[in-house]
Amino acid sequence: MAQEVRVNAFGGPEVLTLVDAPDPVPGPGEVVVRLTSIGLNHAELMGRRGEYRLSTGDPPFVPGLEGGGVIEAVGHAVTSRYPGQRVTLAPAVTRPASDHAPGGRGGAYRTHYLCDQQDVLPAPDAIPDDQLGALWLPYFTTWGCLAWLHGLADQPADRRTVALPAASSSLGLAAAQVVKALGGTAIGMTSSPGKRDALAALPTARFDHLLVTHDADRQLLPFHRDLFRVTDGRGVDVFFDPVASGGYLNNEIKALAQHGSIYVYGLLGTPGPVDVTPLIRKHAAVRGWVMGEVIEAGEEAWRSVCQAVLDRFADGTFTQHLAATYPLADVARAHEEMERGSHIGKLVLVP
């Protein structure tokens, strides 16, 4: 029998409950995917706590923003997919069905996933089974912003310096690979010397420079000075940042080069006063970013980003680092580890 993780009320990891579910039966044009991996993301922690209802809806719901595996069954009139094919779920399909996302089929914390045949993408052989469901939040989010929106590869060669806070996260590691693929310079920013040293020793960490942002007492350092040092006084062209707020954002604004941009894709920072005055004289900008912007631009846009990512896994440009894998039954423990934030790389559920 199939199983799924349900959230019946917002709360801590204890509200994640593994339950039996009916075995899905594909209808015309549908496929059933036996999931071999499900990526964990901070957005799911927020969703579980009730802080991201646009993604989850109200309880009860099944969490999970990304998944992948092997097609187990196909329905009538399925012509482009076949049983045994290794696939990844399309980025938009795991949203709850709504007027905002009419094609959504709900979250991916399941053993089996039912969806339309066009909502699964064939995966390159180079991607292991335990990573099929862990691609889009790190790589789609980053490629969508830096390549599709910002056009980093089209910028002058001396305007491609990108600073990456939360460098030890799966998205930070992916972003460094994306920056290098687009011809840029990647500066990783992390909170401790221990994480800096671990990243420096990690083969999949493609950073040109690694900086520490906090001291031993977890107090923020004036890291804008280090950013000017490693950029020879020029400053940073792009921050791709899940932290930006308060003193952290102040440092980033100070460190921006002329015409620089800060793309904020997360809410990890502590709110506080921000001095935006330097933005004026630098002709600079702070802008929000979510991967949904590509999805809402239409099928051609999101498929082009997906294909760009898959192609680079196929040719070895991208290689993901997994921090740990957990059985689906240990989903609460996996959420607890993600909340501690001491891991480096991607956490994955393996049904």
Image (cartoon, rainbow, N blue to C red):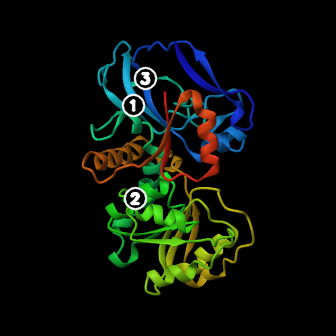
Disc 2 or 1, which lies upstream in sequence? 1
**Residue drawn 44% across and 13% down?**
27
Query: Residue 209, percent across and down?
Result: 43, 72
Q: Amino acid at mark 2?
A: Leu
Q: Position of residue 1 (x, y in %)?
A: 52, 12
Whether label 2 touches label 3, CB < 8 Å = no
Between disc 3 and disc 1, the foreground one is 3
| 141 horizontally vs 317: left or right | right
Question: Is the residue 183 above or below the residue 174 in the image?
Answer: below
Residue 268 position by quadrant: bottom right
Is 73 on the left-hand or right-hand side of 245?
left
Residues at marks 2 and 3, CA–CA distance in whole angstroms: 31 Å
Q: CA distance from mark 2 to mark 1?
A: 31 Å
Q: Nearer the viewer, residue 157 or 17?
A: 17
Left or right: 279, with 123 as reference point: right
Q: Which residue is mark 1?
A: 120
Mark 2 highlights which residue? 202
Task: Report if residue 239 is visible in the image.
Answer: yes
Q: Residue at x 43, y 49 (%)?
A: 140
Q: Badge 3: few (under 14), some or many (20 or more) residues near its Cα, within 10 Å?
A: many
In which quadrant of the rendered view does residue 192 lie? bottom right
Q: Amino acid at mark 3?
A: Arg
- At mark 3, the secondary structure is strand
Residue at numbered disc 3: 34
